[in-house]
Amino acid sequence: MPTLKLRDDLAKDAQVARLAELLGVQTFAVVAALKTVLAERLSDHPGFEEFWRVYPRKEGKLAARKAWNKLRPSGGLLAKVLHGLARWVASRQWRVDGVVPHASTWLNGQRWEDEVDDRQALAGTARLVGPPGKYAAFGPGGQGLPPGLTG
């Protein structure tokens, strides 16, 4: 987590003092909580670099990182995002036609939930890199692809 330097006089701020009073806690507790929340929001959420390695359009990395951190995928959502990405990477629209949105657009629009035209998928062309067994690998013949996405 990054170290945050908040204003030195934040503990003397009238709004912080009022918030502490409303919560029934001391002012330093409010300042500490603010630092924690801000640090969590400003830190990179795990999985972005893996996502970026696989995403085919390498433009707008900062915007993509912001969208990723806003989404904060973990557990089941992370698996869904990466599985959806693998389906789109294997699609004709992305592979052949070259119509790939910016990563931030794809993330903000929750495009991993969109349906890929199964008839246009190119089996066996996408592979997610990760620890063994963590994500489905898409190898020759489309092993691991959802039913109907194999050619």
Image (cartoon, rainbow, N blue to C red):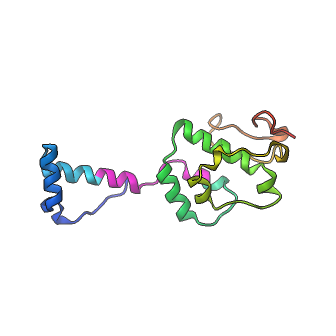
Q: Seen in the image, is 1 located left or right of residue 78?
A: left
Residue stretch rendered in magenta on the structure:
36-51
Query: Which of the pair 138/95 is nearer the observer?
Result: 95
Say whether residue 40 is magenta. Answer: yes
Query: Is 70 above or below relative to 150?
Result: below
Q: Seen in the image, is 70 located left or right of residue 128?
A: left
Residue 73 percent coordinates (x, y):
52, 44
Query: Which of the pair 144/120 is nearer the observer?
Result: 120
Residue 92 percent coordinates (x, y):
82, 52
Residue 46 percent coordinates (x, y):
50, 48
Query: Is 63 above or below relative to 26?
Result: below
The residue lying at 64 percent from left, 55 percent from top is 53
Query: Is 39 above or below relative to 8?
Result: above
The residue lying at 25 percent from left, 49 percent from top is 33
Q: What is the quadrant of the C terminus in the image?
A: top right
The residue lying at 64 percent from left, 49 percent from top is 111
Residue 128 percent coordinates (x, y):
68, 45
